[in-house]
Image (cartoon, coloured by chain):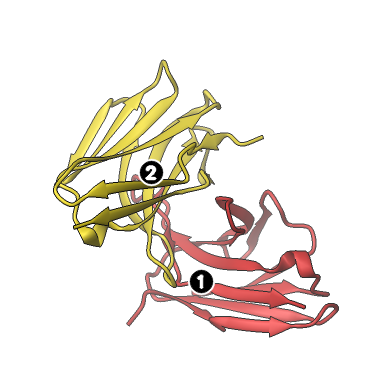
Amino acid sequence: DADVTQTPRNRITKTGKRIMLECSQTKGHDRMYWYRQDPGLGLQLIYYSFDVKDINKGEISDGYSVSRQAQAKFSLSLESAIPNQTALYFCATSQQGLGTDTQYFGPGTRLTVL
Amino acid sequence: DQQVKQNSPSLSVQEGRISILNCDYTNSMFDYFLWYKKYPAEGPTFLISISSIKDKNEDGRFTVFLNKSAKHLSLHIVPSQPGDSAVYFCAASAWDNTDKLIFGTGTRLQVFP
């Protein structure tokens, strides 16, 4: 079984709709992240969370919100989707104290906003 | 402003030869560097990393070199195999913000027989 799972894997929605992307992990890591990837660009950090009570904005948080429901779950919401939020979204996890900044990624969610 | 740059969007190498992927950075606060590999329809997977206290780190066929004065790092794959065909991302983190990775735009490597 995958350590970091994302649902849905693909989603097509319309402008103005509310969308939630979910991420679950079985790695036992305390840190979780949401990134987006656009064609020709690297991964950009949207939000990150060091534990259930700690949420931080990343580089491109406008238009997004997150919820850390449990150590293992981190959801990303688009309250009112717009076409320029069409992208590939990745969730990642890491563990403080492992001695590296290695992050482990989920398989991604491809979101299309029409 | 792109702090981590991968100026070659693609690279094509014959099987058995060396692949060299390059990455440049601008932020002198970066002190830890990673390479991730990404296959289509999958998330990036960690490949190899290097701390700024080193100038080389090796793991099997993969070696990362760091030139701090030039703010440049490279990933060498020897020998290249068709299964290495993927997109490779360079990433960096700063000593005062170790949990935030800044990614490059990626280089698509194709290894042909």
Q: Which mark is residue A108?
A: 1
Decide: is A14 above or below A61.
Answer: below
Q: Residue at x 44, y 64 (%)?
A: A105
Kind of residue at disc 1 = Gly
Q: Which mark is residue A13?
A: none
Q: Nearer the viewer, residue A5 or B8?
A: B8
Residue density around tag 1, few if under 14, some if 14–19, many if 20 or more, within 10 Å: many
| Chain B visual colour | yellow
Q: Nearer the viewer, residue B10 or B70?
A: B10
Is disc 2 placed on a helix, strand or loop? strand
Q: Nearer the viewer, residue B17 or B30?
A: B17
Seen from this angle, which residue lies furthest top? B69
Q: Residue at x 16, y 46 (%)?
A: B61
Decide: is B91 above or below A52.
Answer: above
| Chain A visual colour | red
Q: Chain of mark 1?
A: A
Q: Are marks 2 and 1 in contact (CB under 8 Å)?
A: no
Quadrant showing the N terminus of chain A? bottom left
Residue B88, horizontal then vertical, whole percent: 39, 50
Residue B70, horizontal then vertical, whole percent: 42, 18
Is disc 1 placed on a helix, strand or loop? loop
Q: Could you confirm whether marks 2 and 1 are on the same chain?
A: no
In whole angstroms, how far apart are the C-alphas of marks 2 and 1? Answer: 20 Å
Residue A109, horizontal then vertical, whole percent: 56, 75
Residue A16, horizontal then vertical, whole percent: 85, 78
Q: Chain of mark 2?
A: B
The reply, left or right, for residue A13 in relation to residue B101 is: right
The reply, left or right, for residue A66 in relation to residue B23 is: right
Read off the residue under disc 2: B34
